Structure formats: structure tokens, C-alpha cells
Amino acid sequence: MTNKYDIVTAMDLCVDFLVWGGDIIPEFGQKEKIIGDYLLELGGSSSIFACQCAKLNLKTAGIGVLGEDFFGEIVLDKLRKAGVIVDYVRVEKGKKTGVGVAICKENDRAILTYPGTIDEVRAGDVLQVLNNVNARHLHIGSYYLTQRLQPHYKEIVKKAKEKGMTISLDTNWDPAEQWEGGVLDILPYIDIFFPNENELLGITKKNNIRAAVEFLQDKTKIIAVKKGRDGAEVYKGKEHYEMPGLNVEVADTVGAGDNFDAGFVFGFLHGYDLKTCLKAGIICGSSSTQKSGGIAGQISYEKLKEMI
């Protein structure tokens, strides 16, 4: 096995079309409104995560599917420029690349998603890569959007553990708001669980973070809870740290949680203590909000090391 990577992730490849400014709430009745600005950018939780990891000098390989279309070309270009290894990304004729439309306020957003090729990655694609490469870490994102992979994640995480890999999980939002799909079954294999506050409460069926963490603490190793403008907190056994977000001028929050994940995993793979991993996550997550879209505000390895 000659291919050695720091991180492998199945990417939910798509583009994000962001609109903000002015009266951004649509109205039917053929009403037309003027918005302040827009942006077409790489989207997808694991895709954004992969780009930030690559910019932090982590050798990152992405597995994914794109449509043979203009949006697919944009995605491939963005991934390559970020330094993500795209050897395991295939382009399929007759398929349409996924699109997310984000209507953005300063600290919140509403998202409309056309799945397209987001859910075209198969378990065989992931298992084949895991069998044929040496990698240190597997990251799972967009758990609830990747319906084809969902029934096979237990097999996938078992294979990763057989290969000696550590694993992180960010479920992202469940569009059906059922919060099932076997998440609790795979948590014992997960080294770092990355929910935001609402996702954590949905999955555990609890009404506060403390109760939710107590419910999960014997099921997984590290729980890093993202809280938007309030920063994040992390739990590992009896260890618990909280940290606010950086005081920065926010353009939008798209991808902030995914960039937090990347910073935290960077610290984890470099052997940092838990509090420093949290700090690295906060730096990457907060920094990304200073520019619109998920990847434009991502920071470099050198900048992160300096800020830590």
C-alpha cells in the first residue's frame, strides 16, 4: 500500500448558492425582491472539512461523485486548489451535481438542498478505499443526507478500526427531524463526535446539553458541542472545557462547524491536549466566518500554529 493519507472522508459534493442582504425572505404571488449580494461556492459538510484539513497540511483524500455539468467542474476546481486529493472522485454522465441554496442572516440561515450526486457515494466506494490505502483518520459528515451509506456505516467504521484508524462524526441536520438512522449504534466506534447543540438534543431526545452529554458519555470518547456565536464545549470523561468564539466581524456562518471539525481533528492528530484541540477548532471555525461561503475564510497551517 503506497497511498498514505492523514484523513479520508466520503464527501457530500455540491455547490452552495448563498444570498444575503436586503429583504431576503421570499414571497409567493410572483413578488420580486432585491437582495444585497450572492455567491456561488463549494458546498457540502465533508467537502468543506476536507478543504480546511488540506490547507492545514493534512494529506486529505476525498471520495465522491459529481455530475458531468458546470457545477461539477466548479467543485473539482475548488477541491484541487485547496489541495484535496481527488483520485477517488468520479464524474457520472446523466447525473446532476447537488446544490444547496442558503438564505443567510448574520447569525443564522435557511437552506434548501437538491441532493443530486450528494447521495451517490456507495459503501463499496468507501470500503475499497479503506482496503487499499493507509490512512490515520476517517471523517464522516452529512450522516442524514447520505442515505445510501447510512445502512452500511457500521461495516465502514468496523473496517476503519481494523485498519487502526481513528474516526470522527458530524451528523449535520436531519431534514426529516427523526434523528434515528443508527447513529447510536456506531457511536461506540467514534473517537470524536461533533454535533451542534440542536443536533445533540435531537439525537439524544434530551432538553439540555448536560443531560445529553451524560446520556452519551459511555457511548463515545470525545463529544465536542458547537454552539454558534457562543463558541463550543468539549467533554472527555471527567474533562470539560468551554471556549467562546473569536471576536471577529462575521460575513456569514456557512461552513463554520465543518471548519471547527477540521481544526479540532488537526489538533487531535498532532497529539494536542483536549483544551488545545478545542482552541484549534474555535480558531478555524471563527476564522471561516469572516468571508462568505465555507472555504474562502479558511486559514493556513502557518496562521493556525501562530494563533495557537
Image (cartoon, rainbow, N blue to C red):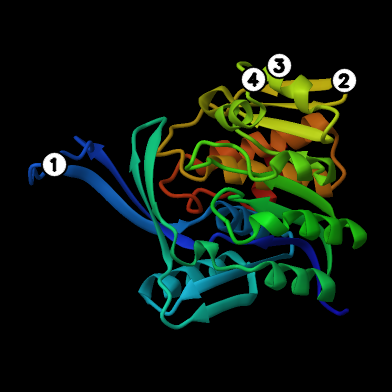
User: Dot 2 corresponds to which residue?
Assistant: 238
Residue 165 seen in this snapshot: yes
In the rendered structure, which disc, 2 or 4, sits on the residue that comes first in sequence?
A: 4
Q: Residue drawn at (63%, 51%), measured in percent from left and top?
A: 141
Q: Which mark is residue 132?
A: none
User: Dot 3 corresponds to which residue?
Assistant: 210
Q: Give the spatial CA distance, label 2 vs label 1.
A: 52 Å
Q: Residue drawn at (15%, 38%), measured in percent from left and top?
A: 27
- Of residues 29 and 136, which is closer to you in this image? 29
Q: Closer to the observer: label 3 or label 1?
A: 1
Query: Residue 95, image x and y in percent?
Result: 43, 75
Indicate the amino acid at tag 2: Lys
Q: Is residue 240 above or below residue 132?
A: above
Q: Residues within 10 Å of mark 1 (few under 14, many from 20)?
A: few
Q: Secondary structure at mark 4?
A: loop
User: Dot 4 corresponds to which residue?
Assistant: 206
User: Dot 1 corresponds to which residue?
Assistant: 28
Q: Is residue 231 above or below residue 252?
A: above
Q: Give the spatial CA distance, label 2 vs label 3.
A: 13 Å
